Amino acid sequence: MGFINPAPVPFDVEEWREKPHLERVKPLAQDWAANGFGTPYAIHVLYILKLIAFSFGAIAVIGATTTGLGGISNFGDWWTEPIVFQKLVVWMILWEMIGLGSSSMPLSFRFLPPIGCILAWVRPGTIRLPPWPDKVPLTAGNRRTPIDVLLYLGVLGLAFALLLSDGTATSAISFSGEEATAGRLDTTLIAVLLGVWVALGLRDKVSYLCGRPEIYGLLLVVFLFPITNFVIASQLVLIAIWFGAATSKLNHHFSSVVAVMVSNTPWNRSKTIKKQLYRNWPEDLRASKKATYFAHLGTIIEFGLPLLLLVTQGGTLGTFAVIGMVIFHIHITSTFPLAVPLEWNLFMIFGTLVLFGQYGDVAWSTLDSAPLLAIILFSGVGVMLYGNFRPDQVSFLPSMRYYAGNWATSQWLFRRDTNAEEKFEAKVKKSSPIVYNQLEKLYDADSAEIFLTKALAFRAMHPHGRALNGLLPHAAVGGEVEDYKVREGEFLTGATVGWNFGDGHFHNQQLLEAVQEQCQFEEGELRIICLESQPIHIQRQQYRIYDAKTGLIETGYVEVKDMIERQPWLDLNYEFPVHVTSGGQAPAAAASPRTAAPA
């Protein structure tokens, strides 16, 4: 790859364009294994500059607005004050909900414009997705109103007020022999912020989850309680995040995640090492034993080191665990994973250093609020566990399946001969053009199609992506996949609802219904496949197929063992065991998938 231009593709574009769908996916999956996405290094430099702005901006603003702290030059004198961590939480909420954090810029397929969030959520008429429109009064509908805009701006305004406020006076309290003198955030203002944030979430789950309530919202709840609880309660929140993320990786998906992510790591330029992550590159792209070893090692670290932090309360072993977790998050940051939650990793590093490094020896007895402990256990443990047993009912964010590979996903099929994708672009009120049009403006039509197909190849390199490929003939009218443009639902979400972070519940039938209301597609023009996450105790994933006009047309399930045994391109014949439980059409074209259509 170059510094400015993407890496060239290893095939003739004219020939590639004329091939059937799976034959277009195959060389791009093979190329990803050896070269990653092919992102220009200049893009990584932009992300590094963003991280620098994030870090120094936080230090400068927090220091300048809080009496008793100071500037960047003497950051080392005041970084452990409790109010610094509290304000950093608020800074994170603002950074994420404005759109500057995760899922911003090109590694999230955001090009022109490079962010979403605020561009969508201050515009009445854009799509919103209420979580329980038929159960919670005054939340029905799928179009943003001035009330929704005011709620969103209210969250931002209250967060800005907290960030810029001085610490409220509190009796001096000592943590680890150091007296906290700069005060704490105002609890009344925190409570109001939480209330407005919840009200926003009842009307739009996307903007609510964007602020990461399972992390920063729970920490704000901690800050409502007496300051004596601050250290241990905050430690427990971080422990819950690590344990939850590790628990979600106890599956057959995570080995593929490691292989695909390391293949895309910018500092790993060794094709030999990358190829060793697969059983027999280029024809067998199932995760190798080496990738599985690294996956297990990462899970052991994510369980083991936080456990040490929990039980040692400082000392040599505690220091070892702190260093280990800092390296753990530095490594994740260095891989520049898609969806790019880079700032979150920096936050976790800072939280580790403050809560377990500086205050690692604070006594457990300082957590003296039983209600607070119950809230942490319910939100950080109970919701996570329930979400892993019932992934259909809980977002993968509070379920903490961030990089587990076990994600709800979707693929959208736009009929070619009716220009369904062009109708979608023209009629849906969005915060940005669809990704194809963004890329076509930057490069050309062929490059745009290659980029989007490489996104499908990325998906197919994970076990659930192979199931999605196997379901394509079930979704296409008459099983004729080549009659459709296949698009990754994840990247349609960024344009339509303002934020995407790997949550398939953002682009399932609820979004389809909102789109249909504006587009009025005819039967067969737009079909979507929704594949739900695997419950932790059941080795299968449920799927549903919808037509934009007629609704649900097929349900069933696929077995995880069948996913992990197959190649991303399904041997170019769409053969995949599918267990239909209702509806369905005979996928006749699966027997003749090589009927080609122009890309």
Image (cartoon, rainbow, N blue to C red):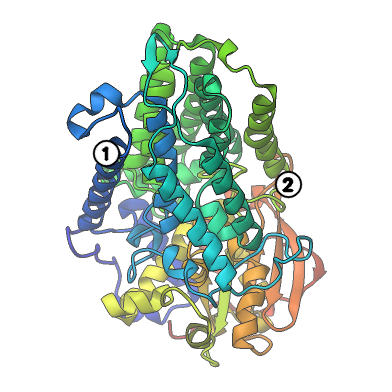
Q: Nearer the viewer, residue 92 or 73?
A: 73
Which quadrant is home to the C terminus? bottom left
Query: Which residue is at a point 55% across and 72% down the rendered structure image?
Result: 146
Is 330 above or below relative to 549?
above
Residue identified by numbered label 1: 64
Q: Which mark is in front, 2 or 1?
A: 1
Kindly state the secondary structure of the residue where label 2 is placed.
Answer: loop
Q: Earlier in the sequence, mark 2 or mark 1?
A: 1
Which disc number belongs to residue 390? 2
Rendering coords of residue 151 (x, y %): 55, 61
Q: Nearer the viewer, residue 350 or 293?
A: 350
Which quadrant is home to the N terminus? bottom left
Dot 2: few (<14), some (14–19), or many (≥20) neighbours within 10 Å? some
Dot 1: few (<14), some (14–19), or many (≥20) neighbours within 10 Å? some
Task: Determine which quarter of the picture holds residue 528.
Answer: bottom right
Q: Can the viewer see residue 280?
A: no
Which disc number belongs to residue 138? none
Is 448 above or below relative to 30?
below
Residue 585 as seen in the image, left or right of residue 529: right
Rendering coords of residue 430 (x, y %): 48, 76
**Separation of marks 2 and 1 at Cα, in angstroms:** 45 Å
Amino acid type for the residue under numbered disc 1: Ala
Query: Which residue is at a point 33% across and 65% down the rendered structure image?
Result: 114
Q: Nearer the viewer, residue 590 or 82?
A: 82
Rendering coords of residue 497 (x, y %): 52, 68
